Image (cartoon, rainbow, N blue to C red):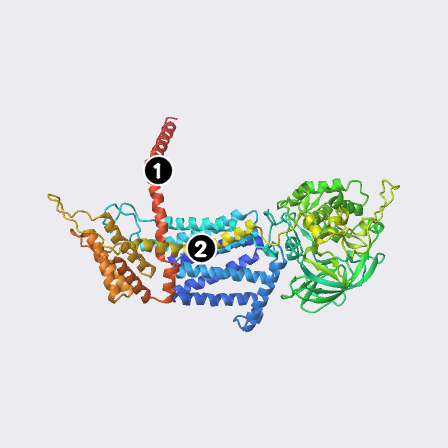
Amino acid sequence: MSGSVRLAVCSAVATLAASCALLPLIDTTTWMLQAAILLTVQTAVGALARRVPLAGALTVAVQALVTLVLLTVVFARSQALGGLLPGPDVFREFGQLLQEGADDVGRYAIPAPATAGIRLMLVGGLLAIGLIVDAVAVTWRSAAPAGLPLLALYSIAAGLAQSGKDWLWFLVAAAGYLLLLLAEGRDRLARWGRVFGGGARSRSPGFLASGAGPALAPVRTGRRIGALALGIALAVPAVLPTMEGGLLEPRDRAAGPGRGDGSGFDAVRPLVSLRDSLNQPENREVMRYRTSTESTRELYLRIVALDRFDGASWQPSERRVTDVPDVLPTPTGLAPGVRTDPVNTSIAAAGSYAQNYLPLPYPSERVRVDGRWRYEPEGRTIAGDRGQTTRGVRYQVSSLLVQPTAAQLAGAPAPREEVLREYTKVPGSLPEVVGATARKVTAGSANAYQQAVKLQDWFAVDGGFAYDTEVASGGGSDAIAKFLEAKRGFCIHFSFSMAAMARTLGIPARVAVGFTPGTPQSDGSMSVGSKDAHAWPELYFEGVGWTRFEPTPSRGTAPDYTVAQEPSAADPGVPAPLPDRSAAPSARPPAAGGCTPQLRRLGECPAAGEASAAGGGHDGGLSPGAVAGVAVGGLAVLALPLLAPLWRRRLRARRLAGAGRPAYAPRARAPGAPGEAAAPPEAGAERTLAAWAELTDSAWDYGVPPDDSRTPRSTAARIVRLGGLTGAAEESAHRVATAVEQVLYAQRPQPTAGLADDVERVRAGLRASVGRSARVRAVVAPRSAARLLWGFSRRRAAAGVRLRSGRLGTAWRRAGGALRTARDRS
């Protein structure tokens, strides 16, 4: 296998290795196999184009064209010309799929389903990075800079996933990049030989000699580059906070002040933004509505239902959607004997509120709304299609106000088998303490209804829990157990925990996300603000259907059917408690000073009172520590491409600082001294050699690699020929070479002035003889920056020699000899 083909294969392997960090983000791995096949074809096309051979830019263009055809065949074959060639319809389809993918990213939690839009984003992005890596590492033979796109791919994926296998994905990505560096080192650096001036030098001024040590090994060079890049790969994800929202927010982690902790709970974007909405300093209005019912405190506006529980997160199941029907089907489980009152509601969403799901009273019967919307029957949710959001949308909803009695709930028959099977699933990773606590709290209950009420009251009243949006309860499968121990959290924690505990008791349960009814206005409308965002559990009772409960203290209102309970079967003489609150919301909430705990529990206090009870949700954004992390991470990422040019510029200034003065003054031999000339002054020789090193490095930056097998005069002639130098630039190159020969060989060296100006003239000539891309590369990614890594290698080798020759090395050798002697005797 030729070096070019080997390098191309290694670049593809490195890209696939780095992309493995994306695997935790998607619930299937078939997209990776698809991407691997397409990447193999892309790599093979590049190898064939270089074998022809084609120019570098043309090779990349051919690969890009083939990649576009591949994506067309896979994702938009029906819109392609002849099922193969991309046309205007194909690009429109790509745009539509990307828009859908962006919506899916905001809609689903990690791991998200591999929808067509998400697959196009993943596969297309991976092919784009693979093309960049192949172009940089193979076409233009610079493997080290190819690590930057690989670093970006791994860092973003690792920062989003935050899974328990982060270390494994890092090792895979690191192995791929080191493999690429090893292949590049064997193929390019080995063919160059020991770069002129790059090997170890002897102490004599004759730096063209072979030197005191061997040439720098290509494998060692690749190892140093890899260590530097991998160190950055470890540091960048550590200082960058994870992005938030849907697929872009996996597990919440402990945060500093001003930012709550979701304790590992994941969901769709409404749930992701819920905590931030509660912590906003002001209650921004998101919608306003008018309704025909006077029981507005029961009119929760439901967005979506989360019914899939894996022990660490609640997520919506991926289900088939349909067009929105004129009349929605009868709610699941609702029997005719339960009282229902029809309600008509007109809703107007604010222009600043852009949500994929339509907030609706539950259960809705008819929805009249303009735009592109789709209906999911199981959760009875309506979601935007092809980028449709709620921004500024006005719509009308006909719904039912379901009012079951406690007796109906207590006498509900066992749920149907399919409901029990799907909505009582509890993973084995859920800590045993969750189920044990549920059984302890509900001990003595005669039926599932009494168990549900006891769970609600334990969280809301009796269990000593406190409402707090700034918790830090941890994450993972033990998140609920930690919350039950800490007893501090907000609606996410209470609803998630009650639903999980209900499932351990065999009660079908899920979590609803949406808004509480809002605040009455003087004009008779209801205003729903960002602080009204809420989550609550829904439990299923046959004959009633999905039923709301309210376990969160100081938030929302507990339903009447959870207060007017039936007498307990064990104590029939105990009268049922009566509701002690009004059925109508207060038009004027009490003053903050008169907001009692009971009023807070009923949701009758103003927002300021809620904030005070919650510990003062004063933060609407990132904490100072997170802002600092973002700033440091951004600066680190921006500084990566600047390291090489900044180091190169500093080195050039240091080399040419004293080269403008005479290199040295003639020195007469002492009477009776040997025939050789006395050594020139050290400072003068260093100035001349520094100017020569800068000239050869400048030539290297502009495409003339050094060759230490040549004399200074031959090297200058080679630079003039390959660099296309003429006139003053050509004379300057030869003048600097003559000055070097004076330092190295002349018995009576003659002083040489103006070497710095000579070097600058050579650089100007080299810059004028190349194209724009070569000039940009000489500044942005100078080839001579490799000396920085070689310097690290020399210092490490010298340190190793000192260590082996010192006392520690002597003691180590003695200990080894003693061990060998003891082994031989035994």
The answer to which of 327 and 7 lies nearer the viewer is 327
Residue type indicated by callout 2: Ala
Instruction: Please tell me the numbered disc located at residue 639.
Output: 2
Q: Residues within 10 Å of mark 1 (few under 14, many from 20)?
A: few
How far apart are labels 1 and 2 at the CA level? 35 Å
Instruction: Please tell me the numbered disc located at residue 803.
Output: 1
Tag in front: 1 or 2: 2
Residue type indicated by callout 1: Leu
**Disc nearer the start of the sequence (1/2):** 2
Image position, residue 609 (x, y; %): 71, 50
The answer to which of 151 and 278 lies nearer the viewer is 278
Asked if residue 517 is positioned above or below residue 387 in the image, the reply reads: above
Q: Residue at x 44, y 62 (%)?
A: 44
Q: Is residue 747 left or right of residue 374?
A: left
Residue 23 in view, yes or no: yes
Report the quarter where the C terminus lies. Answer: top left
Image position, residue 325 (x, y; %): 74, 67
Q: Is residue 143 left or right of residue 418?
A: left
Q: Residue at x 74, y 41 (%)?
A: 439
Asked if residue 472 is positioned above or below residue 382 in the image, the reply reads: above
Image position, residue 625 (x, y; %): 55, 49
Image position, residue 642 (x, y; %): 42, 56
